[in-house]
Every structure is written in C-alpha cells, then in structure tokens.
Image: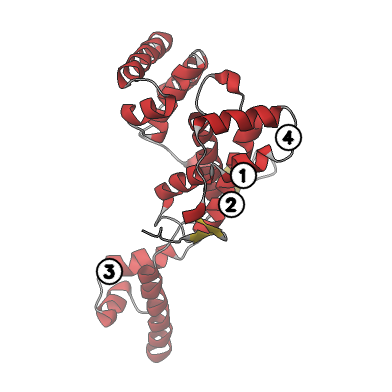
Amino acid sequence: MARHKVEISGVNTANIKVLSSKEMEELFIKLKNGDPFARNDLVQGNLKLVLSILRKFSGKVDNLDDLFQIGCVGLLKAIDNFDLSYGVKFSTYSVPMILGEIKRYIRDNNSLRVSRSVKDIAYKTLKLKDELTVKNGKEPTIKELAKELELTEFEIINSLDALKDPVSMFEPIYNDGGDTIYLYDQLEDKNTSSKDWDLRLALDNAMKELKPREKDIINERFIIGKTQMEISEELGISQAQVSRIEKNALEKIKKLII
C-alpha cells in the first residue's frame, strides 16, 4: 500500500527515514570525530520526531510550516549538545529542547488567534455602527446593534474586544518624572501569593538536585505528558523501572521543598 504523501516546508513526510538506535549511535560517534555529513544525516533521520511534536499544535496555529522550521532549529541544537555519555535516548533529550523552541516562538511571535466568525461579527458591527451613526446623528447602543444583527449583546461586545491589540504588562501607564508605574504594578493575581513563588523557586532548586535520568523522566511525565509505558519504550527499560525512578524522584523533590 502506498504511503500517503504529506508535504510540510517542502519535505515529503512519507519518505522521511527513521534511524535505528544503532544507526543513531554510529552517527553521533562520526559527528564527534568530525564527519561533515553526520550532522545532516542525524537531522534527516529525526524529522519525524519534530513532526510528532507538531501534532500537539495542530489546529492551534495557522502555519505549521513555520513551526516545523523552528522545531528543526531545536533539533539542531539538541544534536549539537547531545552526548552519548548522558545514558539516555536522543529522543528523550531532544523533545524538551524542540518543544521549548516551538513554544518560545509562539510566545514571542504570534498574536492571540481570533476566529474568522468572531472577526466577521466585529466587521459587520463596525459597518452597521457607522451607517446608523450617519443615519440617526448619534452612535447606536450595543443593544440596538445586537437587535439589528440578530445577535446577543455578549457576541457584539466579545467580537469588538477581540479586535483590540493586547497590551503588554510592562506598558508604562504613568510617569511624573520619578519612578515609572507599569501596568503590572496595578494588577493583582488573587490565585498567586508570595508563597506560590517561594514554592516554584524551591521546586526549581529541587529539580537541579535530581540525577539526569530522574530529571528526564519527571520532565517527560509532568511537562510533556507522556505515559510511563511511552517513556519505558523510549529508554528501553521496563515500566516498573520507570515507575520506581519516578517515585524516587518525587520523594526527593518532596523532601527538598518541605
């Protein structure tokens, strides 16, 4: 049966090669010894790893081609920094790096997505608002606009708010020649207290005390969201071993943050 051809960034995903563990090890040895082609072979052989991560963002972004390229940047960084002496599979090491690169790109470069239907309502509302203002000599109320368009007042307000540009928390809102007051100075997070920040710092410090494999498993389980079975297959160990390592790591973290 022919494999279904799907192209992303000009790459035919049906023809992507998947490297075996032995091939991966051999290529990393060649890379360390200065082989000029090993790096490219490692990239080509791990593109499906990038694609598997992109599935998490399917339907959430407009252009997966961009994310694929950014994911490849993360893959390159992982290849350049990986060492066989770490004692873990390359996929275990690289997934957090690729995922982090993609999330950073989305955070830094993408605006909040507004659905087409909400935009359409907003544009119809603004058009009608201008027409009624000219016709009646005054701006219509939200209630009047909603009635004309046969929509709820909430739908009208929500659509107009969606067109507004998001404001940075670091936007200066007042300066009298002294210290500048920023928007975040006026915000209150009722769900987060100083105790929460102390706990986060303690957790970060506790993670640094874990062994590499313990840290990898905790990241895979609670950051990436993989099952113990998936991790056991990646590491080539039993699920019982994964469970034991996870339990020991959590016990260490618990002792360090209490």
Number of residues whose C-alpha sits closer than 10 Å to that of mark 2, classed few (under 14), some (14–19) or many (20 or more): some
Amino acid at the residue labelled 3: Glu
Q: Are marks 2 and 1 in contact (CB under 8 Å)?
A: yes
Disc 4 to disc 3, C-alpha distance: 65 Å
Mark 4 and mark 3 lie on one chain; the one further toward the N terminus is 4
What residue does disc 1 label? 73
Marking on residue 35: 4
Give the residue displayed 46% in from the left and 24% down from the top. Answer: 216
Depth check, front residue: 187 or 236: 236
Question: Residue 114: in sight, yes or no?
Answer: yes
Give the residue displayed 34% in from the left and 16% down from the top. Answer: 241
What residue does disc 2 label? 69
* Mark closer to the observer (4, 3): 4
Mark 1 and mark 3 lie on one chain; the one further toward the N terminus is 1
Amino acid at the residue labelled 4: Asp
Disc 2 to disc 1, C-alpha distance: 6 Å
Disc 4 to disc 2, C-alpha distance: 24 Å
What residue does disc 3 label? 153
Give the residue displayed 52% in from the left and 46% down from the top. Answer: 17
Number of residues whose C-alpha sits closer than 10 Å to that of mark 1, classed few (under 14), some (14–19) or many (20 or more): some
